[in-house]
Image (tube, grey):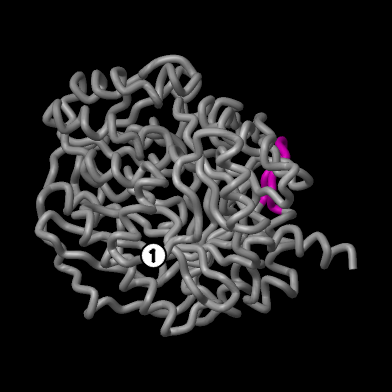
Amino acid sequence: MLESVLIANRGEIARRIIRTAKLLGIETIAVYSDIDGKCLSVQEADRALGIGEAKPRDSYLNIDKIIAAARESGASAIHPGYGFLSERWEFAQRCEREGLMFIGPSSEVIRKMGDKHRSREIATGLGIPIPPGSGILNNVEEAKKWATELSFPVIFKASAGGGGIGMMKVETETAVAEAFDTATNRARSAFGDDRVYVEKYLESPHHIEIQILGDKNGNIVTFPERECSVQRRHQKVIEESPSPFATAGLRHELRQAARRLAQGIGYTNAGTVEFVVDGHRKFYFLEINARLQVEHPITEMITRIDLVEQQMRIASGESLLLREEDLEWNGWAMESRVYAEDSKNFYPSPGKIISYIEPRGDRIRVDSGYQAGDTVSQFYDPLIAKLVVWGEDRNEAMVRMQHALDSYEITGIKNNLSFLQEAFDSGLFKSGNYDTHFISKLKEERNG
């Protein structure tokens, strides 16, 4: 087991990693920007080092400063968390060259799978279905040709990056040129890579994903699926496991496809294989996230397996003691992402938190990054906390979540607690028959 770990992140995920590291007797080293010097992760870590100014490019996204902090602190490993540098193959490669243990997959795997178009080709080669789509588009004429052949609606996607950036849904041929230019410009601005392609847009899609673990000896374990279809701006906001939409047959097929992909690319450490599933339960490979996911706690809740601990053991060279055939899971888990945002338009709403009271109770878990008096900065993701609950069945989990949301108090800044309460109170969510259009359908339900 490693001796010390530097957490190249902030907020709730930094605290989450620190918690497991301390249980394993591993020294924890936090890093912080100028405005994060008094944050909870800095207070809870064994040591902490400043790495620069507030803007991410000057601190949390600066590879040289992160490596320098690791060297100065004597850390034996770096955990990237999620976001920031977690899926930058250049960062993983730099750690490898510097002799620092990177707690994640190899830089080569991250490089291969970080390119959405290339990952589609890899999946196809392994016999895993992908949505109908084009190759990399070179100009507007190609974009129009492919969009017409696929038939509308279609969706333009950036080959690099994630988070929904560069994604543009198009309903008609007349809108193709503008969508192509917008997607290209956004991809160039966000990722320094303007390559885009177009896919057939699937109606009433479900976003379902499979957690995987892989060790350095080729052992792979897949976990029960997570339903992640409640989204705004192509980003998840509510997740549950298992999926109320998945049948036993679909679950088996998804896990088999995830296993085949992981084995085919030599995947190590934790990752998530994401699928889109149509209304007839036909699934297509979407992408692989080569890191820990924001929603990993719901998998932990139903399996009682600490995924961060598994990450650290795998990175240290240990073989997985867990075998898929022995994996036990029970009950139902749900996660709500609590954001500093305006629920009317879901735009970030930074500011100072005046009062902050988290719900407490049996089978309730809150992974948070803030406390009363803290300021949610404009420079970072506005995620305040993840509220996670467990129940014997879906109904019990839903009721527990509703009670937890009712007792959650945040004042001083706008937040999405009212939206989350409305979502869980809705007949659409209670039915379990919802898809990625949930929020627009919720508005229709609200307006009668």
- Determine the residue located farthest toward the bottom in the rendered image: 248
Q: In which quarter of the image is the C terminus?
A: bottom right
- Secondary structure beneath dot 1 equals strand
Classify 10 Å Cα crowding around label 1: few (below 14), some (14-19), many (20 and above): many
Q: Residue at x 65, y 35 (%)?
A: 353
Give amino acid for label 1.
Answer: Ile
Q: Residue at x 17, y 37 (%)?
A: 101
Residue 101, placed above or below residue 248: above
Q: Residue at x 30, y 61 (%)?
A: 212
Taking the image as drawn, is residue 389 in sight? Answer: no
Q: Residue at x 67, y 78 (%)?
A: 431
Residue 437 x %, y %? 68, 61
Horizontally, is 184 left or right of 422 in the view?
Answer: left
Residue 214 or residue 164, whichever sits in front: 164
Residue 340 or residue 184, whichever sits in front: 184
Indicate yes or no whether the magenta region holds residue 395.
no
Taking the image as drawn, is residue 284 in sight? Answer: yes
Residue 99, placed above or below residue 166: above
Horizontally, is 201 left or right of 257 in the view?
Answer: right
What range is drawn magenta here? 409-417
Residue 105 x %, y %? 24, 46
- Quadrant of the image occupied by residue 438: bottom right
| Disc 1 target residue | 210
Residue 414 or residue 352, whichever sits in front: 414
Residue 434 or residue 316, whichever sits in front: 434
- Quadrant of the image occupied by residue 434: bottom right
- Determine the residue located farthest toward the right in the rendered image: 448
* Picture mark count: 1
Residue 133 x %, y %? 50, 54
Residue 281 x %, y %? 52, 77
- Quadrant of the image occupied by residue 324: bottom left
